[in-house]
């Protein structure tokens, strides 16, 4: 009889947990999204969870500035990601820098000066993912979010591609009502020797 009561209680607890989790809204990732959602090399974007609006739709705009057309091996470059969208209340992003051929990590990423509390770098496999942290989800200006990173160029003289996905969020801590924007930028190694 005790086994039946214990089994019945376990089934009831499991059913209650399922009901509660199914009825709860999906939480957003203000602290940072898990790695693997930059949109590059067959990865999904934030749109995998925040699919309320079509990808890259509406009046929002995502830009990446500071990516050099040609990079010098080992040199640091200030990279700025900017997301604008009317009525945006919170924002998040994920950025990667990888070799165009194969998708391996290209150089290193770090938060820009003074951005250490706003930006974190996560690792999945050998690939770095730059993300906002909770403080970095706050807007820098009305309807504008901006994040600054330092990219140190790789020693290998091969083309690099930057993939960025960003979430213009409505601050309700759910996936509903958010808009996802994406962009890419390319950088080529400096040519050495005669043309």
Image (cartoon, rainbow, N blue to C red):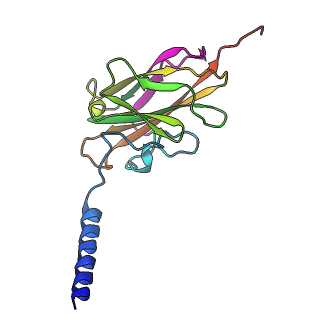
Q: Answer left or right for 109 relative to 25.
A: right
Which residue reaches farthest bottom?
1
Can the viewer see residue 59? no
Q: Is residue 43 above or below residue 97?
A: below
Q: Position of residue 76 (x, y in %)?
A: 50, 15
Residue 70, given in percent of the width and then of the height, sits at: 61, 15
* Nearer to the camera, 73 or 176: 73
Q: Check residue 69 for magenta coloring.
A: yes
- Residue appearing at x 26%, y 26% in the figure: 142
Res 168 quadrant in image: top left
In this view, 99 is above or below 188: below
Segment colored magenta? 57-79
Considering every residue shown, the one lying at the far front of the view is 2
| Picture coordinates of residue 90, whole percent (x, y) | 28, 35
Image x and y of residue 68, in percent: 55, 16
Residue at x-position 71% and y-position 11%: 192
The image quadrant that residue 6 belongs to is bottom left
- Relative to the observer, which residue lies in front, 174 or 13? 13
């Amino acid at each position: 009889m005790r086994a039946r009561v214990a089994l019945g209680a376990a089934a009831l607890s499991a059913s209650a947990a399922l009901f509660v989790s199914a009825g709860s809204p999906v939480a957003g990732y203000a602290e940072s999204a898990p790695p693997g959602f930059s949109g590059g090399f067959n990865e999904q974007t934030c749109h995998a969870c925040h699919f309320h609006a079509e990808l890259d739709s509406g009046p929002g705009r995502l830009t990446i500035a500071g990516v050099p057309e040609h990079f010098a091996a080992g040199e640091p470059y200030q990279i700025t990601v900017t997301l604008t969208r009317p009525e945006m209340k919170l924002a998040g992003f994920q950025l990667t820098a990888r070799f165009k051929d194969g998708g391996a990590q290209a150089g290193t990423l770090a938060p820009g000066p003074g951005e250490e509390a706003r930006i974190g770098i996560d690792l999945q496999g050998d690939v770095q993912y730059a993300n906002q942290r909770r403080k970095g989800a706050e807007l820098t200006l009305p309807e504008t979010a901006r994040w600054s990173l330092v990219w140190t160029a790789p020693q290998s003289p091969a083309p690099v591609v930057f993939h960025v996905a960003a979430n213009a969020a409505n601050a309700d801590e759910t996936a509903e009502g958010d808009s996802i924007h994406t962009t890419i930028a390319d950088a080529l190694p400096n040519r050495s020797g005669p043309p």
